[in-house]
Image: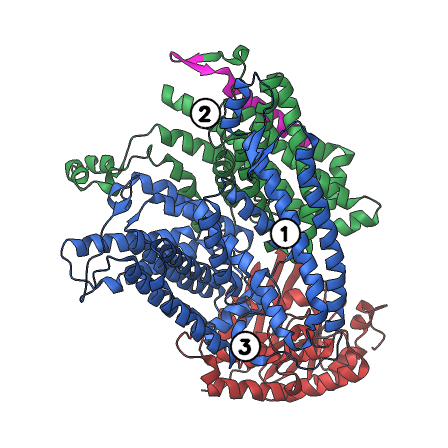
Amino acid sequence: MRTPLLIVVVLALLTGVPPFLGLGLQNTFINVLIACLFALAFNLLVGQAGLLSFGHAAYYGVGAFTTLHLMQAVEHGFAFPTPLLPLAGAAAGLVVGVVAGFFATIRSGVYFALVTLAIAELLHSLAPHWQGVFGGEAGLSSMRMPWAGFTFGSTLQVYYLTLAWVALSIWVLWAYTRTPFGRLTLALRDNEQRVRFLGYDAHATKVIVFAISATFSGIAGALQAIANETANYSLFSAHVSAQVVLQTFVGGSTVFFGPALGAAVFTVFADQISDLTRSWQLYQGEIFVLVVLFAPTGIGGIVEHHLRHWRQLDWSRLAAPYALGGFGGALVAAAAVFLTETLSVLFGEPYALMRKKAGDGYPSFDLFGIHWAPTNPVTWSVPLVLFLAGVFLLLRARREIAALWDAIRSAPASQTADDEVDASLQSTQHSPV
Amino acid sequence: MSMPLHSLQLIDVTKSFDSTIVIRGVNLEILTGERHAVIGPNGAGKSTLFNLVSGMFPPSSGEIRLRGRSITGLPPHRINRGGLARSFQITNIFHRMSVFENLRVGVMARHRVRYGLFRPVARMHRINDETREILALVRLDGRADHMAGDLTYSEQRALEIGMTLTTGADVILLDEPTAGMSREETARAVELIRDVTKGKTLLIVEHDMSVVFSLCDRVSVLVYGQILATDTPERISANREVQQAYLGEEAAL
Amino acid sequence: MEFAIVSALNGVIYGLLLFMVSAGLTLIFGMMGVLNFAHASFYMLGAYAAYAVSSRVNFWVGLLIAPLVVGVVGMLVERFLLRRVHTFGHAHQLLLTFGLALIFEELIKLFFGDFPVNYRMPENLRFAAFTVFGTDYPFYRMFIGAVAVIMFIALYVLLARTRIGIVVRAAERLPNMAEALGHDVPLVFTSVFGAGAALAGLAGAVAGAFFPTNPNMALDMAIIVFVVVVVGGLGSLKGSLVASVMIGLFSSFAVGIDWSLATLCDLVGLGAWARSVGGLLTMTISSISGTIPFLLMLIVLLVRPAGLMGERN
């Protein structure tokens, strides 16, 4: 049983390592866990039911606000165990999810996406004006109250609380895929019309799926409220909804753990890279578009694909082209980063000032520890050369890799798939959304 | 409770789309337990009729009764729960799920496990056993774990029929089940249909007259949205008007 | 009274502006089944392109060049990006255009900064068209409306009366048949996509000189335009027009209405109580005017799920 072992190892690491990490990293871990839960809740709707929601921040946000209200009540003496606070988020997500889901699933396809976006925006535009519920523009704040000997004052305690809830929630989401309703959701995504003719009320089914997804999104929001002890209307913004979409598809929506993978990667990326450059969201967007264009099943899908064909993979022959492709990709990325950062400098305010001082000329600037002159063709040839070299290597590698995979696919159809891997990694089938 | 004489009744049913009248006043009565075919030239409205009966859209006027109770204008899932199930002319299966799961979805509905959220479906033995029965009935046991999208055409048609049976309906509508099949495949399909509709009421749209002859008790001829005649297959094929309507169409007559 | 007239004018003109943007979106959807999430980004690109040109050359040259630039960008997007994901299905097209919208927003921020830019109408257009009860009504607003109306007429004539229009409509209905008849359908698609983008770009170029031009304008416009097409029905130009004007009017009037539920309570003498409760009861319509389009959408979804003009699939 390979996968349960993997899960135990991961859980052990997640439990044992953080006490030895600094506060900053502990916080990052908390954010990663919350993002993973949110993405998995989101994927319930997308990967399972085929419903693409662009406004999931709504349920995340109401979860956070409701929890904060409960926290404020506890602060003022209401006896409620702190570790159970996320229940408030779940309840809020459920209620709002049922109502919103009812409206959103009246129509399907593209309309569904638009309505979900509008519902989130409705909350986003309403919240700053509603002092009582959302704390107006400033938002709400509270404090975690101690319970049963735990102060919940340290980041580490908050981390373990988050870990417990996230692990439990993920287990429930996983179990869901095994229930009759979970299988029905898959069928709904595959062929909604047929589901109707088999005696199911498709609209009711969709509302239920939506509500479940919103419930767990509410728990994620609650965990954020507990960790940050504050929430404001920006939690409803399109940016929050966009992040979960990006994370889910970069990670892969066809594999159960794909979105968690994407959430982890992008959260860490945002955390680390946002300190280094202003253009980190541009890079995120570009990675997302590249995944949609060239790797629609995401990182998770690619990993699952390799695991499924594991016994047929001849690494002695695959290693070289993969390395070549990886190197080519790195060169292209370097070119993109160089160009972007250069443009960022050249079009930025500080440079405009420098230009004025230099009498409207084009003075040199510093980037990556080197001095560059904008008028020197060498400056621009660097990204160009990197890009061309990278593309060349990528194309070479792609041809070789494609040939090797063709050979693998046309190999005699022996059931080489590790069935356990298959069953436990996949809750959906192979095609992207 | 005794079974009504008529399982299905269409009373003055019409259907128009915008300004095009497709069904012009159809009166049809299907006896309980009979096997009834609907034949007619292309464009006569046969699929539209099926769509009306199964609830895909409501009739523009008229009434449809299932076992005496009106189902006019009801949505498909309510009609299905009332005991009527249909297959589709263009295979309408769950391509990305296994054959077993394709059938199980319908069986779950039959057992009213529609929103079952608290037990893994793998432990629902009655449902799984019944699914395996239907799997055997449509002779797809060897392909249980294959993805439905990977099946051959006639295997998919068999699955299509199987899915129609899973909900336990006793009024079965089959829309051109043998379309695109070779002679041998058609013969096998007819055997299958005969087996699985024992004791049920069958309404079948067909182009292949040999199927109609070997399978059906009565035939209705639909031409330009109206029933031209309803009779036994032998008398229908001898009917002058029917022959005229089919001039140039069916060689099998 | 003055309020009613001014609001009505503002509402209709804002509605026409929304229509300029949503027309392209709805045309492209009707033709290619693609909902272009980045359509409002073309609106923003148009505004910024016009700003870039007009700050170096001339406002009118900017108005001319901006739609052309945006149109070309649109054609490139369709030809090299959208077409690639066509085989993956509608969801992937939606995701791709969603990603593009993000990228466009970030690119604008890269080149022009996070804050609004000073794109203003030229001085010679800064006069009053007429006076309403003592208030000057800006000519430029009328100009925006006029551009929208001209565009609508031109679109109608083009589609209904010219050969190009017939080919486009044929390609929309039955692309395979149109191709069999010798028309280069992929080229038609690329051109329509580019034209839709250019329209949005023109709208941005014109509106950006009056309304704020900032990196958020794409998102703000996108959301309203999406509400328009949900209410009006995707694929229906008439529906877009009606929904646009409706939303324009509702939003416009809402801005000036200071009623709240407490005002309603005044009628039955419970005003003081309502005000003491606060919260939802004292929220004025004017303060939540931004929320009005969404409420409208929810109501339409309940009452007429297929949209005002019926759903086009």
Instruction: Say whether marks 3 and 1 touch (CB < 8 Å).
Output: no
Residue A137 versus residue B232 in the image, above or below:
above
Residue A246 position (above or below residue A379): below
Which mark is on residue A330? 1
Q: Of the numbered discs in the image, which one, if any, rests on residue A423? A: 3
* Residue A420 percent across, percent down from the top left: 55, 80
What is the three-letter code of the residue carrying label 2?
A: Asn
Q: Which residue occupies the foreground of this view, B199 or A421? A: A421
- Output the chain of dot 3: A
In the image, C25 versus C260, the foreground residue is: C25
Quarter location, residue B157: bottom right
The residue at 51%/51% (across/down) is: A113
Query: Which of the labelled discs sits on residue C10, or is there none?
Result: 2
The verdict on a common chain for dots 2 and 1 is: no
Q: Amino acid at mark 3?
A: Ala
The x, y position of residue C75, in whole percent, is 70, 39
The answer to which quarter of the image holds residue A157 is: bottom left
Toward the viewer: A410 or A115? Answer: A410
SS under mark 3: helix
Q: Chain A is shown in which shade?
A: blue
In the rendered image, residue B192, in percent from the top left (x then y), is placed at: 68, 86
Alpha carbon separation for disc pair 2 and 3 = 59 Å
The chain drawn green is chain what?
A: C
Neighbourhood count class around disc 3 (C-alpha, 10 Å): few under 14, some 14–19, many 20 upward:
few
Viewer-side residue, A207 vs C37? C37
Badge 1 sits on which subunit?
A
> Which label sits in the foreground, 3 or 1?
1
Residue range highlighted in magenta: C131-157
